């Protein structure tokens, strides 16, 4: 399921997103402040999405988490569209805003990619929010500004940096999506990875006995590049095979991308 951000009223949504910068109008008169607030509603929405997924997100579900009716939330957040925008921007505040400048450009970019990978694994529902239309909130902009700054340290031109933003972020998101899916697969399907692969491998061997001859390149790759558990990752607590595969693919792929940046730097006049 792909969800598009920014479907609420533009001015109202942006005013809520930037309320910490432009200031929010006071509510009510003297006396104790209400227990509900925009921040409380957003935090509850994030908790629902983290625990139950995007499909479970509704104003009613958020209200139940707060012990209120859905109608009580509308005083603070106009609707689900605006809530999603606020949730998306809010969690981006978790990302580091700076990395050591003394470490050159490659080390900080590597750490940035690792941080962003774990960020998406913590909040897999973010991966369902389309990147075609950004939320345009302050925390999303801060995260983008950090990445642009790290890429700017490579010395490459602005046009190249712009394209690298559109290369690195989707790469990390794709890796995170595979990790998140690997963790969810057994729960959703009711079958472990071992059970799933064992059943299908046996059936495929029986139905297509000449598989290796039909697909020699794939068969050779499977023989020569099998993924082994990392030290300390074997046994019952080991991550599932698809997650190990995704993390190794991320590590190797990131290295190749950074090697490409290094090669581009070497061509600078």
Image (tube, rainbow, N blue to C red):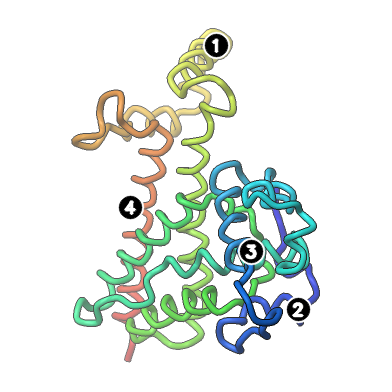
Mark 4 to mark 3 CA distance (whole Å): 43 Å
Mark 1 to mark 3 CA distance (whole Å): 56 Å
Circle 1 packing at 10 Å, graded few (<14), some (14-19), many (20+), is few
Residue 12, numbered circle: 2
Image coordinates of residue 35 in percent, x first then y, are 61, 63
SS at mark 4 in the image: helix
Q: Residue furthest front?
A: 31
Residue at (52%, 75%) from the top-left corner?
Answer: 139
Mark 3 to mark 2 CA distance (whole Å): 19 Å
The residue identified by callout 3 is: 36
The residue identified by callout 4 is: 251
- 125 above or below 135? above
Q: Of the residues tagged 4 and 3, which is closer to the observer?
A: 3
Image coordinates of residue 141 in percent, x first then y, are 53, 79
Residue at (49%, 11%) from the top-left corner?
Answer: 202
Residue 203, numbered circle: 1
Q: Of the residues tagged 4 and 1, which is closer to the observer?
A: 4
Which label's residue is closer to the chain start, 4 or 1? 1
Q: Viewed as shown, does residue 134 lie left or right of 209?
A: right
Image coordinates of residue 196 in percent, x first then y, are 51, 19
SS at mark 3 in the image: loop
């Amino acid at each position: 399921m792909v969800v598009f951000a920014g479907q609420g009223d533009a001015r109202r949504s942006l005013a809520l997103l930037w309320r910490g910068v432009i200031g929010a109008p006071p509510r009510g008169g003297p006396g104790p402040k209400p227990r509900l607030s925009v921040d409380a509603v957003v935090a509850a929405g994030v908790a629902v999405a983290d625990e139950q997924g995007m499909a479970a997100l509704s104003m009613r579900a958020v209200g139940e988490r707060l012990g209120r009716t859905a109608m009580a939330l509308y005083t603070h957040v106009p609707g689900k569209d605006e809530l999603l925008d606020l949730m998306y921007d809010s969690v981006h505040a978790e990302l580091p805003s700076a990395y050591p400048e003394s470490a050159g450009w490659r080390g900080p970019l590597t750490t940035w990619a690792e941080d962003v990978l774990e960020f998406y694994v913590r909040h897999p529902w973010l991966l369902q929010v389309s990147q075609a239309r950004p939320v345009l909130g302050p925390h999303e902009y801060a995260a983008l500004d950090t990445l642009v700054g790290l890429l700017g340290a490579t010395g490459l031109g602005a046009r190249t940096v712009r394209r690298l933003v559109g290369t690195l972020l989707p790469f990390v998101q794709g890796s995170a999506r595979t990790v998140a899916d690997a963790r969810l697969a057994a729960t959703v399907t009711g079958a472990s990875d071992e059970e799933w692969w064992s059943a299908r491998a046996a059936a495929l061997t029986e139905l297509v006995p000449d598989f290796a001859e039909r697909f020699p390149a794939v068969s050779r790759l499977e023989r020569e590049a099998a993924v082994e558990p990392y030290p300390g990752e074997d046994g019952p607590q080991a991550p599932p095979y698809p997650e190990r595969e995704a993390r190794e693919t991320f590590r190797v792929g990131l290295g190749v991308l950074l090697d490409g940046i290094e090669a581009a730097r070497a061509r600078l006049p």
